[in-house]
Amino acid sequence: MTHKEKAIELLKQKYHCSQALLGAFAGDFGLDLKTAFKISTCFGGGMRQGTTCGCITGGLLVLGLAFGFTDPQDKELETYGNRKTEEYIRAFRERMQGDIYCRDILGKDISIPEDMAVIRQEGLILQRCPRAFFVSIEILEKMLEEYGGELLSVDLEEIDINEDEEIQIMLKNMSRRQRFRRHVRALLNETERKVAFVQFDICRFKIINDLYGERFGDEVLYWIREKLKELCNERQYFVNLRSDVFQVVTEYDEVSELYRMMEAMGRELEVYKAVKLQYSIGVYLVEDAGMELRQMEDRAAMARKAAKNSLLSEVVFYQEQFKTSLYNRKFVEDNIDIAIREGQLQMYLQPKYSISQNRIIGAEALVRWSHPQRGMIYPMEFLPVIEEDGFITKVDFYMWKKAGEFLGRCQKAGIRDCPLSVNLSRRHLQDREFMQVLEHIVEESGICKHLLELEITETMEEHVSQAAREMKEQGFKLLMDDFGSGYSSLNILLETPFDVLKLDRKFMENMMVSDKGRLILEHIITMAEQLKLGLIAEGVETREQVEMLKQMGCDQVQGYYYAKPMPEEDFYRLLLENRGAGIR
Ligand code: C2E
Ligand code: MG
Ligand code: MG
């Protein structure tokens, strides 16, 4: 993503101007958005007073990160500056023809909260300020690219020897990155051959740090840098992008040359002090030499991350579709917190039916993310991302609370026979906090415990039995979700006291296409009966499936044939209608 694209995306997400500008460049300094914004809230005095354009504030923050803050406060502009401040402001003023006052450009006063709300709500910055934005990005790109390396090396000389060690290391790394980029840009401009970006990191580097200590981890990284110096020839450039991420840019004619190079490097970098190292390697083959370097690096990074998830290969070449998946991941990570805070997450309910009684017997709560710009986002697009960092537990808590509230409302309306099941991420099993949360929800909404049912997927092998037993002791009803989709369904069944099996959707498909599928299903239904377990079939889509399930003795179903997941209000209405019609 270019700086411009990134800035526009942030503006669309209702970040304000200086945040969007700083955020667009954050990655250049190895900063994540959260850290960048933390920095931005410390500054920005000029903009907050509604005078100076936010692009100046944001621009100076970017320059500050690049070159350090050295000048005293500039009283006139009320912004802190560095040695590049004046040059930047001069260039900005010139290109904007003096038009640099926020109130003039926006027609609103960013320092007044009500005005600020309108600005965000109506996306005024995007409508009225694109010129200021693009001008500032262009100036910043030019300054960073042209002066970055030299300036940083000067800064380094000037740094006090007692200066914080971390800052020194950061500046050195930035200086190296800038120098690397200049060399690569020159190579891309002049070479007749093809060019590839090979990016790699150490698999499970965190574990190495934990096991052998951070000092050992640092030693490993130093050793790799020294090795790469030996291994790269004068037309191959390498850089340590951050922590354990390295990148080599090389010319090539045939892809086989790249494989040979990677093999040779792999051999040299395989063992350090008897510790075996493995790498995830991503390769981007440059197609358009005019593309921004950062974009090329991003693509190599996407391939590297894909290599991490690939079981088949430790080398992955970039493909176009990686772009969307990685953007999504970043989008989710950066926005899920706001989504919860601003009520963008909604509870959808999918009814469960009894075939024989033709009535609703409950519902499953399924999360939906209704994003103001992106529209509806489905669980499989964001839950796997937040499962990794554990944020999913917050989403679950939110959904359980909503489910509790809904049940409370039903109870007040006299509907006491419509349990809701909520999904439980495996993340909860790592501690017992979730049980207290559940207890609290039940207490607060004043409902009977058995009305809030818990769906646990059968793939949650670890500690599932113990946690499940405890939940059961507390009086909750347990449903085994997606039964039959994993490898250990039957084992878990033996060890864990589930009340109900939810047959995986796959069974519905298999049952329709093969006798064998049908036979297995019949036996599972019998088994559930004999074990005195409840049974509900998921993903029921057709009349034929309903008929067949009925014949086999499975009465409870959930699926598009009866109803899709719907907003809670719609479900509430449906419940009332059905009761009114005597269907209940
Ligand atoms: P699940 O718990 O197995 O939920 C059933 C999924 O199947 C839902 O997808 C539902 O919309 C879909 N479905 C229902 N009937 C049919 C049908 O007839 N045909 C087809 N093709 N699909 C049907 P959804 O809502 O996209 O959720 C996907 C998964 O995301 C859920 O699978 C569940 O594992 C997870 N999930 C959803 N909401 C939450 C939540 O709040 N917390 C947690 N931890 N997981 C959730
Ligand atoms: Mg479920
Ligand atoms: Mg399921």
Image (cartoon, rainbow, N blue to C red):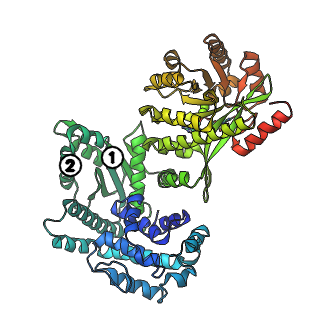
Quarter of image, res 183? bottom left
Disc sitting over residue 441 in the figure: none
Which of pointers 2 and 1 indicates the residue nearer the eye?
2
Q: Amino acid at mark 1?
A: Tyr
Q: Amino acid at mark 2?
A: Asp
Q: Which secondary structure, mark 1?
A: helix
Task: Please indicate whether residue 202 sits to the left or right of residue 487 in the image.
Answer: left
Q: Name the residue located 69 percent from the left edge and 43 percent from the top edge.
A: 568
Is there any visible trace of residue 201 in the rendered image? yes
The residue carrying pointer 2 sits among few (fewer than 14), some (14 to 19) or many (20 or more) residues within 10 Å by Cα, namely some
Between the residue at mark 2 and the residue at mark 1, the CA separation in whole angstroms equals: 28 Å
**Tag 2 residue:** 218
**Tag 1 residue:** 259
Task: State the image coordinates of residue 321 (x, y, percent, origin top left).
Answer: 52, 51
Say whether mark 2 is within 8 Å of ligand 1: no
* 532 lies above or below 29: above
Residue furthest to the top in view is 530
Q: Name the residue located 85 percent from the left edge and 30 percent from the top edge.
A: 582
Task: State the image coordinates of residue 322 (x, y, percent, origin top left).
Answer: 48, 51
Write down which quadrant ligand 2 falls in: top right
Say whether mark 1 is within 8 Å of ligand 1: no
Badges 2 and 1: C-beta atoms under 8 Å apart? Answer: no
* 295 lies above or below 318: below
Task: State the image coordinates of residue 537 (x, y, percent, origin top left).
Answer: 67, 26
Is there any visible trace of residue 320 in the rendered image? no
